[in-house]
Amino acid sequence: MSADPTQTLAFDTSCHLFDGCGFPAPGLHSFLFKPLFGDADSNLYFNKTMLLALLGSIIIVGFFWAAFAKPKVVPGKLQMIAETGYDFVRRGVVYETIGKKEGEKYVPFVVSLFFFVWMMNLWSIIPVAQFPVTAIISYPAVLAGLVYITWVALTFKRQGFVGFFKNVTGYDKSLGGVLPLSMTIEFFSNLIVRPFTHAVRLFANMFAGHTLLLLFTIASWYMLNGIGIAYSGVSFVMVLVMTAFELFIQAVQAYVFVLLTCSYIQGALAEHH
């Protein structure tokens, strides 16, 4: 490993099987990056994940700007791709979950979330970048926080304080004696567990997927020596398989994130009985 494990995902490229050195397994050091500029000790710095998040935002905005800056009745290829993605989220997620009438105003928010999360996930398999921004918990946590604030604000606005209380506690007087216990569980589930699981679900999947990709990639290089070349080939095949699988998981996780977002918004808008 390099002397400073916070610098990079790198491993000792001179280390191979049968050379007397141990396998340079990926670990938490693989998710830490040296600041590109600034001071890490003072927490005022800019690192690789921040750069990827910024570039991802610029790419998304630039793509939709280019696609819809001069929309045509008969769309070109770029406009068609953008419209397909936009309609997929609008009709397949927002309308299906919230409904067309209520959901239309939330389409821009949900579409933005979907493509941002997807782009942050995609960095994992893009050469040079090769890191999913959402594998750093702070990014999913902020996104889940935005959804949480939106949900709480909408519930208060639509249902008032009493309605909000009933909504987050699952108040149902027909439960009788178990009502206090049920309300307590629902209260903690909705106000504490919900935002936590919303963030961790995305983070954990991206963290695990990237770790597996690193594991097989490093193993392919490590075993590239002597008879180990045969094992290296098998490991490289697994790199390709895991890359294809990650492509699928990255899209699914973006979809699940916005699907849950719409589910929470729908719950805030629904009348509690």
Image (cartoon, rainbow, N blue to C red):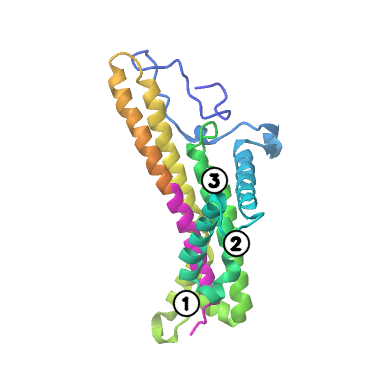
Q: Earlier in the sequence, mark 1 or mark 3?
A: 3
Where 114 falls versus 215 (above or below)? below
124 with respect to 60 (left or right): left
Give the distance between the C-alpha atoms of the residues marked 2 and 1, in whole angstroms.
27 Å
Q: Residue under label 1, please give it.
A: 170
Q: Is residue 257 above or below residue 183?
A: above
Q: Is residue 31 above or below residue 80?
A: above
Q: Circles 2 and 1: CB distance less than 8 Å? A: no
Residue 232 placement (x, y as % from top left)? 33, 23
Amino acid at the residue labelled 2: Phe
Residue type, mark 3 in image: Met
Q: Mark 2 falls on what kind of element? A: helix
| First of labels 2, 3 by sequence position | 2
Does the residue at mark 1 contact the one at mark 3 (Cβ under 8 Å)? no
Within 10 Å of disc 1 (Cα), the crowding (few <14, some 14-19, many 20+) is some
| Structural crowding at the residue carrying mark 3, measured as other residues with C-alpha within 10 Å and reported as few (<14), some (14–19) or many (≥20) | many
Q: Label 2 to label 3, Cα distance in Å?
A: 17 Å
* Residue 16 locus on image (x, y percent): 38, 17
Q: Which residue is mark 3?
A: 120
Q: Which mark is residue 109?
A: 2
Which residue shows up at 31% across the image and 13% down it?
226
Which disc is residue 190 wearing?
Answer: none
Dot 1 falls on a residue whose secondary structure is: loop
